[in-house]
Amino acid sequence: MFLDWCVEAGQSFWQLLPLTPTGPGGSPYGSHSAFAGNAMLISPDELVNEMFLPRESIETSATFSDGHVDLGRVMAYKSRLLRESWSRFQRSANREARLALESFTFAPEQESWLDDWALYSALKNRFEGAEWLRWDRELAMRDAGALARARSELHGEVAFHKFVQFLFFRQWNRVREAAGARGIRIIGDVPIYVALDSADVWSRPELFLLNEEREPVVVAGVPPDYFSKTGQRWGNPLYRWDRLEEDGYDWWVSRLEANFRLADLVRLDHFRGFASYWEVPATEETAINGRWVKGPGIAFFNSIRTQLGDVPLIAEDLGDITPEVDALRKASGLPGMHVLQFGFGADVTNPHRPANHHSHAVVYTGTHDNDTTVGWYAELTSEERERLNVWIGHEETPIEWRMIRAAYESPAVIAMVPMQDVLGLGSEARMNVPGEGSDNWTWRATPRQFLPDQAAKLRSLAVAAGRVR
């Protein structure tokens, strides 16, 4: 239904947040895996259609909020359905499904991550959700004998988690095929960092800056900026870029290959971290007392291009962008980003200002870290509004549609609009407030919100701007 609506609206691209398992607070940027799919995105209806569940299993008298996801309730509901699906699958004689699961489990593209992810997930359940540093020491430190015993003891649980991944990728492949059949290309998203409590850090500690106890000495973040006066202390472990380079960046190559199996284009989050990154002592409570450290630079992108070819990446070049960062983006050949909400200040050299846009870029009205356009506009001063009106007009058209038109008329090669702006929603529908740990990542749209009127408006603007192919 959504993809058909996109066709009616003249849309050619659909951009997603990361599809990996979400971390604390539902953040897709604090995932427990850089490779696994988010089990909470598995469709119960499709489980019924594929005969993994009977229809009555998904019928519930419980009501779920239309506008926001109650993460705890949804996880409990879907976890029950996945467990029931696994139980029925084990009893089933469906040879085709069994062969498909076996093919997925032993596929070369899953070899680098699936076994570790499934064992990590099984152990996490055994230790009641505790992060891996709090598991029994021999398991946290990956003693070979302890791991072998755990695989034997948790064989059924490990198999269950592989089955869940099989379901996710089976369903997502169909979504991607449906999008491709309609001429819609999917833009994925790769966070630059992974969470400390992740299968990645647990299974490959040598790739991260950890002490002998495998605790981070320094963590990732960004200095004070537009979003936060104290910066953002993300807390992710930082990479040992020297070790990654020795291995030809194999881990990153595998990660990007995995994401190109999910999407047609991929946005590289926090691109400036590849030039230099903000390193914060792990003992600090905020990101203020950090320092810039040189990143892998063009050697990383040259290696990626050598191994994967000229893959379509987008640089999320937001934040403190220095000439060094801009030079790296140009040298790597990646398109950057323009965000209209950042473009109406007094600085005439601001790259987000409409007059300064260029074609080798993707333009957004706002991103998942911004307020919605309606919410953002409500907080502007009269001076800021007047400056905005000079650029996009004073007419009575609602602000969100004026901003959408400005994005479509930009010379940027791709124009992206958050659904909240298409629907004309205010701050109550904001996706994320950077630096704040609660009430983020829960907004959702419902099928009845995708109306023909909005599709017609989007199409007319896209046609007028020459963006309909």
Image (cartoon, helix red, strand yellow):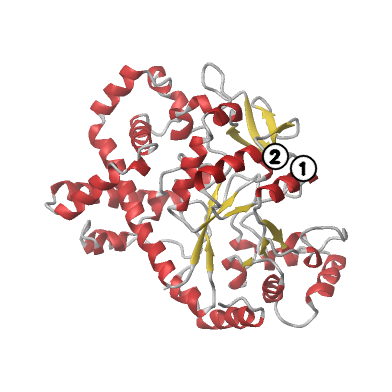
- Regarding residue 86, the answer to whether it shows in the image is yes
Q: Which mark is residue 324?
A: 1
Q: Is residue 121 left or right of residue 429?
A: left
Q: In the image, is residue 7 above or below residue 224?
A: below
Q: Tell me where residue 172 appears, x and y as whole percent.
A: 38, 57
The earlier-in-sequence mark between 1 and 2 is: 2
Report if the CB atoms under discs 1 and 2 are less than 8 Å apart. Answer: yes
Between 133 and 263, which is closer to the camera in this rendering?
263
Q: Residues within 10 Å of mark 2 (few under 14, many from 20)?
A: many
Residue drawn 76% across the image and 50% down it: 226
Q: Is residue 442 left or right of residue 150?
A: right
Please, what secondary structure does the residue beneath circle 2 have? helix
Where on the picture, by quarter, is residue 458?
Answer: bottom right
Name the residue beneath numbered marker 2: 275
Residue drawn 81% across the image and 67% down it: 355
Please, what secondary structure does the residue beneath circle 1 have? helix
Identify residue type, mark 2.
Ala
